[in-house]
Image (spheres, rainbow, N blue to C red):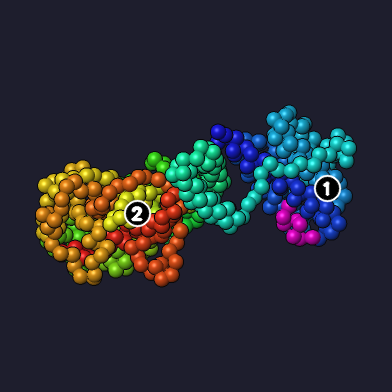
Amino acid sequence: MKSREQEYREMFMAEALEYYDAMGRHISELEKNPSAEAALNELFRLMHNLKANARAMGFNELGEIAHGMETIFGLIRSKEKDFTGSIIPVIFGGIDTIGTMIRAIGEDAAMPEVDVLLANLDRLVKGEEPVLEGELVTTDDARKLELSDLVYIQIKKLDHLLNLVGELIIDRDRIFTLGQEIGNPALQSVASHLFRIADELQYSVMDARLVNVGSLFNKFPRVVRDVATAEQKEVNLTISGQDIQIDRNILQIITDSLLHLVRNAIGHGIETPQEREKSGKPAIGELAILASTERDDVLIQVRDDGRGINVDSVRRKAVERGLVSANAAATLSPADVRAFLFEPGFSMAKEVTDISGRGVGLDVVKLAIDSLGGQLRVESELGKGTTFTLVLPTSIAVKGALLFELEGRSYALLLMHIDSVVSLWPEQLHVVGGMLLAEVQGENVPVVSLRQLLHTSDEPLPPADRSELHGRQDIIIANYNNRRLGLIVDRFVRQQNIVIKPMSQPLDTIDLFGGVTLLGSGQVCLVLDVPAITRVFLAKRP
């Protein structure tokens, strides 16, 4: 496996060679037409980018040459110099030297001597004549033509390729199952080889789509500065985990959500310097954007040390808005209460923003994360701060799922929304307020028959009757929006990666179904949507 340093070096080489090729084109155009403004602007941009990249990689001499060239092109752009006379051979020599240095970096060879070139660039900047004797100019016998080892591919092409891989995975599983059923050794051997090849192809394509989260994180220092200035607040931003990799499409989808959370943290979470000093805090607020991995997931956190969320105030507002009864609200944990902030009707109220410092637009953030099969968690301590955690899959093409049976049919739930699975005897379940409850990991979790939940009309669920349960009950403990719900199914089958296909019309209008997949047996398997199931349960519970 390549080290991170190797990857960065290869990326630098690919871009540097691309810049060098473009420099050759534009400088030739500029020589033919010294007033070619587009070519001049592009040369200035290329030198600026190369300077920044070279310095970031520690190639300081290359960075200095690019800086000198950038300065001269800037003077030409501002009409302080003309692209004529002795300036031409220095510029051409500089571009040739840049090419030689880039090749030396790629071959890990010795760098050329550049003192004469740097001195001439300095003379030109000062308005002096260069000393052309000893200037490095590559001749056509000596010139090398280089092609980059990397290519740039449009995302839509990778999307198409990944869709084809998904189809291949489905057929692979069917062939593998067929080989086992027939028992033909030759077919089994071919099926096993196809299984390995398809797996390798799948992960290779997924790997090609991965990008560092730093490509998004590194845009936030300016955002934080601008929002803090507008809000008349002082904020220190900390960023970590930029090297964590994730599917590029996932990063694109969460961009607006992350931007919203950062703006909310500054606008409503972090107090003004005066408020912070009155409460014994430093005048400068702390904001952190962090990335890490947890098993197969990527965790992105937005953490502030601001005023936090007033759980009691949110609890009262939830009751006022009819989202929960007063008796039920009194029994809710702080995590359950904070979950109301993601409810659409709740989050639009200005009062909630004033009370809790959170709320506006969080339902939109939640929907974006749900669309990825992810989770949005919130932790907060009044007066201490708030942390939002985005739990995201590494890839959106192939997802881990738990397969189970219900009335002889196979269904799937994404592992992203499953805390655990348990098998309990009826006497281990309790009826409280017409609902079944099970104690799981020290917490009382409501339990409902998935069959009953799927098949009942819009009427409320009938009161739970434990006597209707016979034998051990297989229960999936699902988790959505910090709410845990036990779903009784007929039988656990297995855990496996699946490729989810969208539902066709008119089934795509049924919220409970998140898509469909095809199993190795050729059987169609519905993928149930945990967020929708949770919402249905909350609406129908007695």
Look at the image and say whether residue 336 sits in the magenta stretch: no
Q: Quadrant of residue 92?
A: top right
The quarter of the picture where the N terminus appears is top right
Residue behind mark 1: 87
Residue type, mark 2 in image = Ser
Q: Residue at x 76, y 60 (%)?
A: 37
Q: Which mark is residue 410?
A: 2
- The spot of residue 157 in percent (x, y) is 60, 55
Q: Residue at x 41, y 55 (%)?
A: 523
Look at the image and say whether residue 38 sits in the magenta stretch: yes
Using residue 508 as the reference point, say whether residue 97 is left or right of it: right
Image position of 136 with respect to 230: above or below? above
Q: Which mark is residue 290?
A: none
Marks 2 and 1, the one that precedes in the sequence? 1
Q: Nearer the viewer, residue 458 or 145?
A: 458
Image position of 119 with respect to 164: above or below? above
Q: Nearer the viewer, residue 155 or 432?
A: 432
- The spot of residue 218 in percent (x, y) is 51, 48
Q: Check contact, mark 2 vs mark 1: CB within 8 A.
A: no
